[in-house]
Image (cartoon, rainbow, N blue to C red):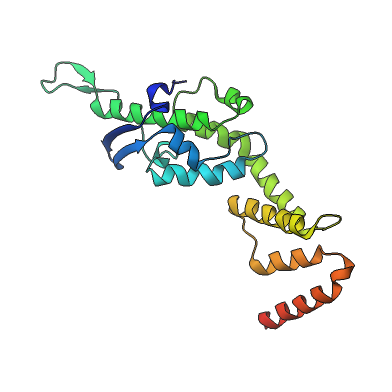
């Protein structure tokens, strides 16, 4: 696994050309960390994914993990055709790949990082994380939907209750399984206690009126 070295403390500016186009980097690890405030643990993969994918995309770096920027040949034949020499495109790709790898590793908690020790490219680590958490993600979506359908304010204050509802809705959106506004309102109303019956009845009537 590569060390982030000086790229983790200072801004790296470079460019590379490939079949996927040119990548120019002018971003430091601290500034990247500002875009991804959540470090991946065993329970927040969907939330983490919802932050790191846009962060990589906005710097045109997602191609390093999705397979659309394959590794260039390490060696190419010299101009005279007599020797093999290092491919400049490979060197540039390697430099960028290791930077992305250092960013991803920095966004992992220690237990998760231990699962990808020994993997040497950003794509290798990304694929390993996908395998580790993808099945858990489907289960997580089902769990969140169940929580949404069985909302109960209980002893929570209204602020805390609405915050809980928003948290579940945000988690579903991060998992690319967003709930519709209508279902969000209906589930929220169903979770209110009996003293809100009049309010719930009024809101349900309005909802039915809008749906007609």
Q: Is residue 151 above or below residue 13?
A: below
Q: Position of residue 48 (x, y in %)?
A: 57, 41
Residue at horizontal 62%, vertical 55%?
A: 177
Residue that sits furthest to the top in the current view:
83
Q: Quadrant of the C terminus?
A: bottom right
Q: Is residue 57 above or below residue 65?
A: below
Using the rendered view, name the quadrant where residue 71 is placed: top left
Using the rendered view, name the quadrant where residue 211 is placed: bottom right
Q: Nearer the viewer, residue 60 or 25?
A: 25
Residue at horizontal 44%, vertical 32%?
A: 29
Residue 73 in view in this figure = no
Residue at horizontal 73%, vertical 53%?
A: 164
Q: Position of residue 173 (x, y in %)?
A: 60, 54
Q: Is residue 167 above or below residue 44?
A: below
Q: Please state if 206 lies on the left or on the right of 107 as rendered.
A: right
Q: Position of residue 23 (x, y in %)?
A: 31, 39
């Amino acid at each position: 696994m590569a060390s982030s070295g000086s790229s983790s403390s200072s801004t790296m500016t470079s460019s590379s050309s490939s079949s996927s186009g040119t990548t120019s980097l002018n971003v430091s690890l601290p500034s990247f960390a500002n875009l991804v405030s959540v470090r991946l643990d065993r329970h927040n993969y969907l939330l983490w994914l919802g932050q790191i994918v846009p962060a990589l995309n906005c710097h045109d770096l997602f191609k390093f993990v999705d397979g659309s920027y394959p590794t260039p040949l390490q060696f190419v034949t010299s101009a005279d055709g007599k020797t093999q020499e290092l491919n400049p495109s490979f060197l540039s790709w390697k430099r960028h790949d290791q930077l992305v790898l250092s960013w991803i590793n920095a966004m992992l908690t220690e237990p998760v990082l231990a699962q990808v020790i020994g993997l040497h490219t950003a794509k290798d680590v990304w694929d390993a994380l996908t395998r580790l958490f993808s099945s858990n993600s489907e289960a997580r979506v089902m769990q969140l939907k169940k929580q949404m359908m069985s909302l109960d304010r209980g002893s929570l204050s209204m602020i805390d209750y609405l915050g809980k509802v928003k948290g579940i809705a945000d988690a579903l959106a991060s998992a690319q399984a967003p709930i519709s506004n209508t279902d969000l309102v209906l589930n929220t109303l169903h979770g209110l206690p009996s003293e809100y019956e009049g309010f719930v009845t009024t809101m349900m009537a309005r909802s039915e009126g809008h749906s007609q």
